[in-house]
Image (cartoon, rainbow, N blue to C red):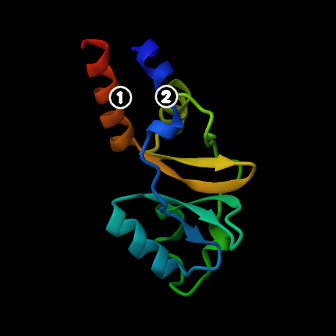
Amino acid sequence: NVPVLKTIKIGDAKIRDISRLNTNSVERTLTIMRINDLFSLPVIDKERNFLGIVLMSDIKDSPPNDRIEKYVRKGVAYVSPNSTGEEIWNVLASTKSTWIPVVQKGKFLGVILLNDFVELYREKLKTFFE
């Protein structure tokens, strides 16, 4: 229901800080992916600039001590703090991802997980019937 999606703002959503520094090792990054049940992670630098993402499929057979900066995919879609639920949903659908980065002026703020977004949508939907 698109009208409900338009009422959702990033500020309503749970933003999680799940990321990896570009200097982290492949081994450590794979561990974080497994712990969080994710097949990809956002990659940032020490100043929290959003660099892109790293995919499990790109690093799973790589040397464990390699730095993930070698495997970063740039030009990845993201949302900003001003994005609506409709924009979030469109990016999640087009990227076929279970999370989306939230970025403001190049700085990484966190990610919104698909499950958290669906829960927020359900909560907002209930208020339309009250």
Label 1 environment density (alpha carbons within 10 Å; few <14, some 14–19, many ≥20): some
**Element under label 1?**
helix
- Tag 2: amino acid: Gly
- Residue 124: x and y in percent read 34, 25
Whether residue 37 is situated above or below residue 89 in the rendered picture: below
Q: Quadrant of the C terminus?
A: top left
Measuring from the top left, give residue 21's x and y in whole percent: 61, 73
Instruction: Specify whether 81 is left or right of 28.
Output: right
Amino acid type, label 1: Tyr
Give the residue displayed 60% in from the left and 83% down from the top: 66
Is residue 124 or residue 44 the one in the foreground? 124
Q: Please indicate whether residue 114 sits to the left or right of residue 106 in the image.
A: left
Disc 1: which residue: 121
Query: Would you say the residues marked 2 and 1 are in contact, meaning their CB atoms lie under 8 Å apart?
Result: yes
Residue positioned 49% across, 28% down in the render? 85
In front: 113, or 68? Answer: 113
User: Which sits earlier in the primary sequence, circle 2 or circle 1?
Assistant: 2
Disc 2 element: helix
- The residue positioned 43% from the left and 73% from the top of the image is 30
Q: Position of residue 47 (x, y in %)?
A: 71, 69
Identify residue for label 2: 85
